[in-house]
Structure formats: C-alpha cells, structure tokens
Image (tube, grey):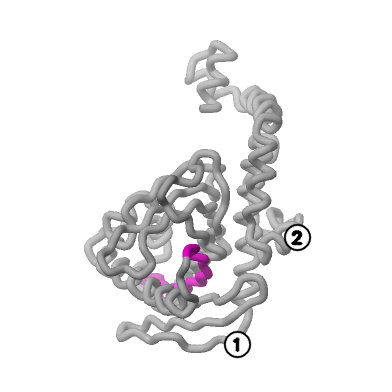
Amino acid sequence: MLSATFKLCCGISHEHLRKMNELKRMALSAIGHVTRGLMSKGSQCLSSTVPDYIRRIMWKDPAASQEHGSEVNSSWFSNTELSYVNQGEATLHGALGILQQQGGWQTETYQGKGELVLSTVLPRLGKVFRMETVLDVPVDQLFYELFEKLEQMPEWNPALSRVKILQRIGKNTLLSHEITAQCPGNLIGQRDFVSVRHCWKKETTVYLVGTATHSEFMPMQKGQVRAESGLSCIVLQPLEGDGRQTRFTWLLSMDLKGWIPKSIINRVLPQSQADFIRHLRRHLSTTAHP
C-alpha cells in the first residue's frame, strides 16, 4: 500500500520507482510521520496488552533490537508497527532466558516417538511447558512450514479452523489471527488469538516466537472467547551430521480465558503440543522440500 501511495504522489512508473531507492525512503519516512500521529492511540492500547513478565523485559532492554539483529529501519514504520517489533523482540529475549534455565523442570509426558514435555512455574508468567523432540527434516523446511506458510497450517493441523496474517512488518515480524476448530466433547471450546510473531536466526539455529497482542485489524469478536498466548517459542536447531534432522524445542505458556480450571488447562496444553507434533510429522512425510 505504501508503494502504491508513493507512485500516486510522484506520478512515475513502477519500473522507474524501483530505481529511486533514496527518494522512496524519503517518501516512506514522510508517510510514516503522518501515520505515527494517526496511530498513537493504537500504540498505547498495544502496550497495555503485553504480559507483565514480557513488558518488564521489553522496557528493561531497549537495545534488544541490536542484540538480535533487527533489520527494521525506524523511519519506515509507524510507532504502532515499531511497538509490534519491540514486543516480538522482547518475547524472544524472555524466551532465551527461560531456555537457559537448567533446573526446575518436571516431566509432564513422554510420547512413544520421543516427544518429551517438561514444565516449570515462573513469576508473572505462570506454568510454562517445554516440548523436546527430533524431526527428520532440515531446519529450512520447518521454518518454511511454520512461518512462511503460516496461513496453510489448518490444512494439516485439525486443531485450527483458520489462520490469517493481518499485517507484515519487515521480513521478521507479523501479526496473525488464529481460530481453533470446534470439536465435539472439547472441554475448552473454540477460541481465537491475535498474536505478534517474530523470527530470528543465529548461525544455524532459528527461533520462532509469539505472544498475545492487540490489533485494530481484528477487534474482539462477538460470541468468541479470545485467549492469550503469554509466550510461545519454537527453536529449530540442526543436529550434527548432514543437517537432515532438526532438534525441535517448544516453550508454551497460555491463558485460555473463560471459566476453565487450571488443572484442565495443565492437562490440555502438553497434550496439544504432542498432537501438534503428530500432525506435523504426518504432514512433513508427504511434503517435498520447497
């Protein structure tokens, strides 16, 4: 939309536009100043939705974007868009701290194909589940399926009925809306989520993080219970050797809202992780590398 606006203002062809990188940057910067004023209210709403545990890290480490190699140029984006990027990077920063914790984890479940689920309780975040397994596919293919092809996930994961990318911010951050599927006998019931998702690559390891956020593109839906992902972080790390196998680690903390006892939630979440891996394995077995 910004490119189209720029073309309209300058009255030049698309081919000529691509050759004028500097002029485009100046125009986008000017548009950004206008957008920042219009969206300042949305930015304030966004800040209020960040979980306390993540918000504390978010404002404590203003240099997080430099540490994690952010490619976002602040002059290209509105305050609200930059808030989403900061929220994603802060979630990543918090997840890295949790991943470094060696003690305090308790075994929840162990599945036949090596899916181990552990858990721990953290201040302000509550119970966090950690799944560990190995998948017989390269890191790049998993990244492609879980981030680039996010909207196709309901095609192979029956727990979801719809996934929609609401907005992309640069190459590494996006907003998404997910709706769970209606299942007879499901104790939890249908939920929807609005999340900011962020990816980061360090050497050969890929991190995919997500957390609940607010977006004017998808306000609360009437009759729909909006759950919140406090923290989700998937770590894709190649095993030593030919790179055809990936160590898959998944941190998950979630508030499903509604009148649901914690004992039920604490049973459902690790089982949902195991189910997700089962469906992912089945999908990958019939999918060629992109």
Viewer-closest of 267 and 136: 267
| Residue carrying label 1 | 104
Sort mark 1 into few (<14), some (14-19) or many (20+) by Cα contacts within 10 Å.
few
Q: Left or right: where does residue 271 sit relative to residue 232?
A: left
Please name the residue that numbered disc 2 is placed on. 61
State the SS at label 1: loop
- Which mark lies nearer to you, 1 or 2? 1
Dot 1 or dot 2: first in sequence order is 2
Q: Which residues are magenta?
A: 240-258
Q: Residue 8: x percent and y percent?
A: 54, 15
Q: Is residue 218 visible?
A: yes
**Could you say whether the residue bearing mark 2 is in a helix, strand or loop?**
loop
Which residue reaches farthest top? 11
Q: Quadrant of residue 264?
A: bottom left
Counting other residues with Cα less than 10 Å from the Cα at mark 2, is it few (<14), some (14-19), or many (20 or more)? some
The residue sitting at 43% across, 59% down in the picture is: 143
Image vertical order of residue 150 relative to residue 28, above or below:
below
Rounded to the nearest whole Å, what is the CA distance between mark 1 and mark 2? 25 Å
Relative vertical location of residue 110 with respect to residue 41 in this rendering, above or below: below
Q: In the image, what residue type sits under mark 2?
A: Asp
Seen at 30% across and 61% down, the residue is 157
Q: Is residue 242 visible?
A: no
User: What x and y, as percent, mark residue 56?
Assistant: 73, 63
Q: Is residue 260 left or right of residue 29?
A: left
Q: Is residue 250 magenta?
A: yes
Please give the name of the residue rendered at 37% of the width and 60% of the height, measured from the top-left corner: 141
Front one among 8 and 140: 8
- Name the amino acid, label 1: Gly
| Residue 184 against residue 42 in the figure, above or below | below
Determine which quarter of the picture holds residue 54: bottom right
